[in-house]
Image (spheres, rainbow, N blue to C red):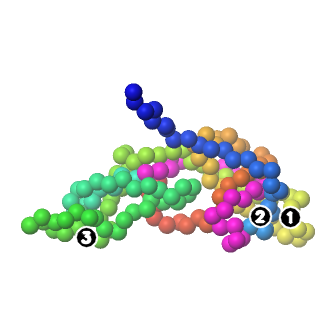
């Protein structure tokens, strides 16, 4: 008998912890789960976010598939190709990879802008914002104006080379 093959699953977390203030979330919380409340002030259109990118070496045409960082992260692309050149072949240069978009794998992704609740903003200060990245079943469930309590991983968004 064949073993059943499990598909990808999406896990929703809930927490009874108190919410953190956006002002108190700093470097100590990097890559940790945080619970935050606020008001959604913007929702992006739905984008295709690559989870695995298929790359082809522009020199030897070898193909490899690399994973992408979760959230807004890009692909983890190796610098070099491990193809061993045969006599008469050019060795593969550094950074030889070209993404093949229609061979890559995607999920739906949306970004939301969460603003501090008015009651959490100290007098005379401007409200702070955070960018949320939601994917798959969470996409298109929230409209601007919605008060949210979210549990998520706090990270810094690096606008580097992304294949999405
Ligand atoms: Zn190559």
Is 64 left, or right, of 127 in this rendering?
A: left
* Label 3 sits on residue: 93
> Ligand 1 is in which quadrant of the figure?
bottom left
Q: Residue furthest front?
A: 1
Residue 86 falls in which quadrant of the image?
A: bottom left
**Mark 3 or mark 1, which is nearer to you?**
3
Q: Earlier in the sequence, mark 1 or mark 2?
A: 2
Residue 109 percent across, percent down from the top left: 57, 48
Q: Earlier in the sequence, mark 3 or mark 2?
A: 2
Using a 10 Å C-alpha cutoff, classify the residue at mark 3 as few (fewer than 14 neighbours), some (14 to 19) or many (20 or more).
few
Work out whether 138 lies above or below 131.
above
Is 126 left, or right, of 164 in this rendering?
A: right
* Mark number displayed over residue 22: 2
Measured Cα–Cα span from mark 3 to mark 2: 45 Å
Tell me the SS state at disc 3. loop
Is 67 left, or right, of 30 in this rendering?
A: left
* Mark number displayed over residue 121: 1
**Mark 1 or mark 2, which is nearer to you?**
2
**Residue stretch in magenta:** 26-52
Residue 90 falls in which quadrant of the image?
A: bottom left
Work out whether residue 104 can be spotted: yes
Tell me the SS state at disc 2. helix
- Given residues 59 and 82, the one toward you in this image is 82
Q: Residue furthest left?
A: 88
Residue 64 percent across, percent down from the top left: 32, 54
Q: Is residue 47 magenta?
A: yes
Measured Cα–Cα span from mark 3 to mark 1: 53 Å
Q: Earlier in the sequence, mark 3 or mark 1?
A: 3
């Amino acid at each position: 008998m064949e073993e059943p093959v499990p598909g990808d699953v999406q896990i929703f977390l809930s927490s009874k912890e108190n919410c953190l203030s956006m002002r108190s979330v700093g470097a100590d919380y990097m890559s940790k789960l945080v619970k935050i409340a606020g008001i959604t002030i913007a929702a992006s259109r739905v984008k295709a976010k690559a989870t695995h990118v298929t790359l082809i070496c522009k020199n030897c045409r070898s193909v490899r598939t690399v994973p992408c960082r979760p959230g807004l992260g890009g692909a983890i692309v190796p610098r070099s190709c491990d193809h061993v050149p045969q006599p008469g072949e050019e060795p593969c240069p550094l950074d030889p990879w070209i993404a093949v978009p229609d061979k890559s794998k995607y999920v739906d992704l949306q970004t939301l802008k969460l603003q501090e609740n008015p009651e959490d903003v100290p007098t005379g200060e401007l409200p702070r914002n955070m960018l949320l990245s939601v994917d798959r079943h969470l996409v298109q469930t929230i409209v601007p104006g919605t008060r949210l309590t979210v549990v998520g991983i706090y990270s810094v968004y690096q606008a580097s080379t992304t294949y999405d």
